[in-house]
Amino acid sequence: MLTQINGLHHVTSLASGAQENNAFFTRTLGLRRVKKTVNFDRPEVYHLYYGDELGTPGTVMTYFPFPDAGPGRPGTGEVGTTSFAVPKGALPYWEARLSGHGTAGMIRTTRLGEERLIFKGPDGDGFALVETDDDRAPWVADVPEDVAIRGFHSVDMRLDPRGAAATAELLGFMGYDREAGEDNVTRFRVPGGNAAQVIDITEIDAAPADQGAGSVHHVAFSVDNRDTQAEVRKALMDTGYQVTPVIDRDYFWAIYFRTPGGVLFEVATNEPGFDRDEDRAHLGEALKLPSQLAHLRDRLEQTLEPIAD
């Protein structure tokens, strides 16, 4: 069993437009844009990162906004809901705020004893705010500190019965304990994690999902450094998983593998962080390009969708 996983590192999704996506996360949810860069493989597409003040692992939602991308089709083999932690008693504030911003799909529910507010992102993305005792320091801009988002609470994977059983076994190997169950939901938690340490599996009988705008592309798990990442990679490969070589993503090193349930997992390092190429006071302001794409700057600055901050 692995002991190196700290919890979630980041969650990466697809969007249909950069400006709308940026406005939703910075103005509606009150997160900080900590990096404005581009997709390594498709440099004509942004890669936008939102999180707390420094983009601490366990707080960072990232997006590839493909212009005019069609909507995804929900189904099995995907993350259906990404949940953020907020302080207890904060949901009435968020109901009013989200309503004022025209947010769709708001529903108050309870899961495993926790109060939660479900809502939709601009591309139909599935989100929830969950009231917890999380004491992580939030980014404070438009949202008052006493109700602001603290970072991730969990992700909820929608899986068919076979995928659910096999993924539960994988999570156990990754150091997660089965904590509780309710109806068709099973909760897993990595002990001693980074506060973004919960994974839910919702077992459903449905057709496989088709990815598009609003879909989660992959879920990344946090490890401290490259040495621990190498240990995780070897253990996964020894267990039979096909794992990519280590890839330099400028702000972390990454490895990827596909889970039995169909969800793409990444294991990302906490080092070097989002302040490696920008002053902390100005994170996310300038367009940052990987060195191998620096020669494209003039063209990209002319063709990428303008983002009004």
Image (cartoon, rainbow, N blue to C red):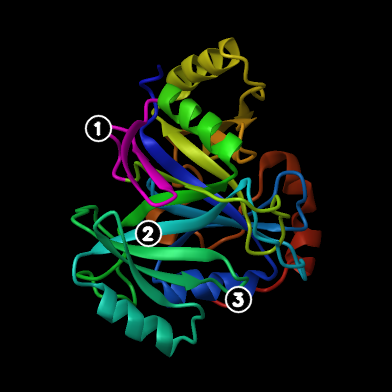
| Above or below 147: residue 252 | above
Task: Name the residue at the top extreme.
Answer: 238
Q: Are marks 1 and 2 in contact (CB under 8 Å)?
A: no
Identify which residue is drawn at 63% across, 63% down: 214
Query: Which percent across, then down, holds residue 262?
Result: 65, 39
Look at the image and tell me whether residue 307 can be seen. no
Magenta stretch: give its range: 175-195
Left or right of residue 112, residue 247 in this image: right
Q: Nearer the viewer, mark 3 or mark 1?
A: 1
User: Mark 1: few, some, or many residues within 10 Å (few <14, many ≥20)?
Assistant: few
Q: Are marks 2 and 3 in contact (CB under 8 Å)?
A: no
> Could you tell me how far apart the alpha carbons at marks 3 and 1 are, in whole angstroms?
36 Å
Identify which residue is drawn at 42% across, 69% down: 118
* Residue topped by disc 3: 20
| Above or below 33: residue 119 | below
Task: Name the residue at the bottom extreme.
Answer: 100
34, 84: nearer the viewer: 84
Type of amino acid at the residue the image marks with label 3: Glu
Type of amino acid at the residue the image marks with label 2: Phe
> Could you tell me how far apart the alpha carbons at marks 2 and 3 are, in whole angstroms?
20 Å
Mark 3 or mark 1: name the one nearer the start of the chain. 3
User: Mark 2: few, some, or many residues within 10 Å (few <14, many ≥20)?
Assistant: many
Disc marking residue 84: 2
Residue 234 located within the stretch drawn in magenta? no
Query: Which percent across, then down, holds residue 65?
Result: 68, 63
Type of amino acid at the residue the image marks with label 1: Gly
